[in-house]
Image (cartoon, coloured by chain):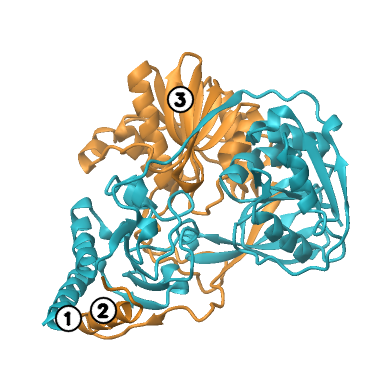
Amino acid sequence: MARIFSYIVHRGGTVDDSAAELTAVARKIDPTVPPTAIVTGWGAGLDAVCSSLLSSYGEVWKVANEALSYPNAELVRQALVSILPANSILLVPHDHFGIDLSPGLSIKVNSAFVPDVLGIDGIEGDSLRLVRQEFGGQVSAHVRCDISSGAVINVRPGAFKPEQVTPISSVVFDKSSAVGTLTARRRYLETIVAEAGDVDITKHSVLVSIGRGMQEKDNVGLAEELAEALGAAVSCSRPVVDAKWMEKSRQVGSSGKTVKPKVYLACGISGAFQHLAGIKGSPFIIAINKNSKAPIFQVADVGIVDDVLEFLPELTNKVREMRGVAAK
Amino acid sequence: MEILVCVRRVPDTSENEIEVNAAGNDIERNELVYSVNEADNYAVEEALQIRDRVGGNVTVVTVGGEDDEEVLRRELAMGANQAVLVSDEDFNGSDGRGIATILKDFVKKGRYDLILTGVQADDGAAQVGGMLAAMLDYPFASLVNSITVDGGKLKVGREIEGGNREINEIDLPCVLSIQTGINEPRYVGMRGIRQVASVPIPTLGVSNLGVEKDSVGEAAAKVRRVDYFVPALSKGADMLHGSREENAHTVFELVAARGGLK
């Protein structure tokens, strides 16, 4: 059985939630041997990160290198190529860093690569069966991966629940000396923090959230009228921002804002996992979409198959009517 | 600047309800609406804008079959200087690595300063650009949402969490995977496509590119799809089946009951 490693994402001395999820993935692949954590970075927080992993990982491999102060995928890749044993399985979160790192790493270590994995379906000899999604989450696929020369597996954040495991007591191995001088042809310069918008969607208890189903910019007004009638705010999914119908500050999702409303009206939103990742606190989700196969209906509490352009004005009228009556 | 953009023709998920076919080995392909992969279209627009600022040529390439010519012609109508179809029976069944291998051999036949792909296609894999860069030993950046040319280097913004952007300097030649929203792709009408109807689109295969046959195709694939399926779902949404007016009433009451009215 191939040895299993997890790449640990950490910020400011704290381990990301993905570390516990990757442990769960490793146990699904091989329940007999605890996986090994790989922690790369530099500075004061690094040892704290390593220590916090000792109860859940069989070994912790530390690579301390000043060039790794910021996780530049090109430099991290060089470090991993230096320390990963041949034919290993490496688990990486499928986030903006994993998308940057893993495809190229798989080439450099001559391993298979499986992106955005949602499920582990068992192993037979050199063949690992996994579950993925295609076509914007509308269908799932079983995938078979030949792990005879190892594999890099990118795991969808949030797809695996961390498991309660009996704490173990492992050891940190310092692998820093195995990594030579690191140089990159892509250099990190700075991080530009998102601008605050005119409306703070994270503070609202009801969101009228719109997606591609709104079809054109002129129709955004339909959602604004409903939001006004309800006393809610309008938020949106990525395609609405891509099309420049709304400002980036209104976007809900992993590359936008994380919101915690009481009620979330998903209007013409398909429900890509990157969008759902931005909805926290288990709000009551009401989805309106003309595609009955839209993944949003799998997570919504109530669903309506209808054209939002027809339904929203009807709902706005209803809200005005009912509230007008209530006010008398 | 010589720019190559790798594109793909895919079923348009915003226009189609995707269903698994009876055999479970593919999706129902009858009556699907196809289009150029959305992120790839942004990549072509970005290439055109860079060319128009600093000069040079934009070449568009796809690995596929005859049917894929329509997306190449669309990108020619947008303003690409040339388009190439890479097609060969031996390429069938290639995994992401196989496709990257074919593109690597194509790139080596030319001279490109900048290679763009869309960040991901219909399979959501986001893999070919990063693999291609590693095979060519070029630097790579994914999820790119801004590009500024600065001499022999680029300044690129990457989309990271929470709407933040990571700014990097990257040496040329390089490979970038382009995120949707980086620009506003220009409109292409039927008239524009008719105007490029007679532009020749060369087709290249294994022998033209010098691809090692055993590094591509189904036999070389380390990753293979076994089947498509629709997962057994958790309960899912309670669907409302009333009239539009009744449904609106129900939604109003649900929002009110959850303390949603202000």
Q: Position of residue B54 (x, y in %)?
A: 37, 17
User: Mark 1 — residue?
Assistant: A322
Residue in front for this viewpoint, B199 or A209? A209
- Within 10 Å of disc 1 (Cα), the crowding (few <14, some 14-19, many 20+) is some
Left or right relative to B249: residue B97: right
Regarding mark 2 in the picture, which secondary structure is present there?
helix
Any idea which chain is the orange one in this picture?
B
Callouts 2 and 3 close, C-beta under 8 Å: no
Q: Which residue is mark 3?
A: B3
Query: What is the chain identity of the residue bearing mark 1?
Result: A
Rendering coords of residue A189 (x, y %): 54, 26
In the rendered view, tell whether residue B43 sits above or below residue B241: above
Q: Chain of mark 3?
A: B
* Outermost residue, left side: A328
- In the picture, the disc for residue B197 is none
Identified at 47% across, 41% down, the residue is B164
- Provide the secondary structure element on which disc 3 rests: strand
> In the image, which is nearer the foreground, mark 2 or mark 3?
2
Figure colour of chain A: cyan
- Disc 2: which residue: B252
The amino acid pointed to by label 1 is Met
Q: Are marks 3 and 1 on the same chain?
A: no
**Distance CA(mark 1)–CA(mark 2):** 8 Å
Q: Position of residue A226 (x, y in %)?
A: 21, 66
CB under 8 Å between discs 1 and 2:
yes
Alpha carbon separation for disc pair 3 and 1: 58 Å
Label 3 neighbour load within 10 Å: few <14, some 14-19, many 20+: many
